[in-house]
Image (tube, helix red, strand yellow):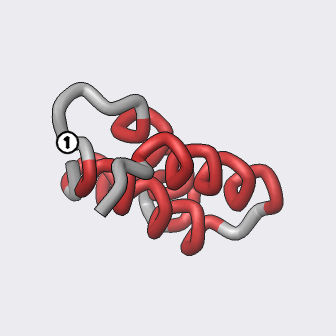
């Protein structure tokens, strides 16, 4: 499978900007799964998780 981590990260950014937090999280997680070492999606996934649930739950999940 080609290395589409950046594409999934960009799609996560687009979904996040539209307010679709669940789709954004899904895309960021795919980016992290493809390239787990130092991926920028780690920092991007926090905001949708934090605003979708209680902040303490977002912190616990990562």
Query: Disc 1 on helix, strand or loop?
Result: loop
Q: Is 34 positioned to the left or the right of 4 in the image?
A: left
The location of residue 18, given as percent across then percent down, is 82, 60
Classify 16 as above or below 52. above
Classify 18 as above or below 4. below
> Residue drawn at (35%, 48%), measured in percent from left and top?
3
Q: Is residue 46 visible?
A: no
The location of residue 39, given as percent across then percent down, is 32, 32
Mark count: 1
Of 39 and 56, the residue lying toward us: 39
The location of residue 5, given as percent across then percent down, is 41, 47
> Residue drawn at (78%, 50%), measured in percent from left and top?
17
Of 49 and 4, the residue lying toward us: 4
Neighbourhood count class around disc 1 (C-alpha, 10 Å): few under 14, some 14–19, many 20 upward: some
Of 29 and 47, the residue lying toward us: 29
Residue that badge 1 annotates: 36
> Residue drawn at (55%, 54%), measured in percent from left and top?
48
The location of residue 35, given as percent across then percent down, is 25, 43
Residue 2 in which image quadrant:
bottom left
């Amino acid at each position: 499978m080609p290395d589409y981590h950046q594409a999934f990260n960009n799609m996560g950014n687009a979904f996040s900007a539209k307010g679709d937090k669940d789709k954004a999280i899904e895309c960021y997680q795919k980016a992290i799964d493809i390239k787990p070492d130092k991926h920028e999606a780690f920092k991007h996934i926090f905001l949708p998780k934090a605003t979708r649930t209680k902040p303490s739950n977002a912190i616990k999940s990562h």
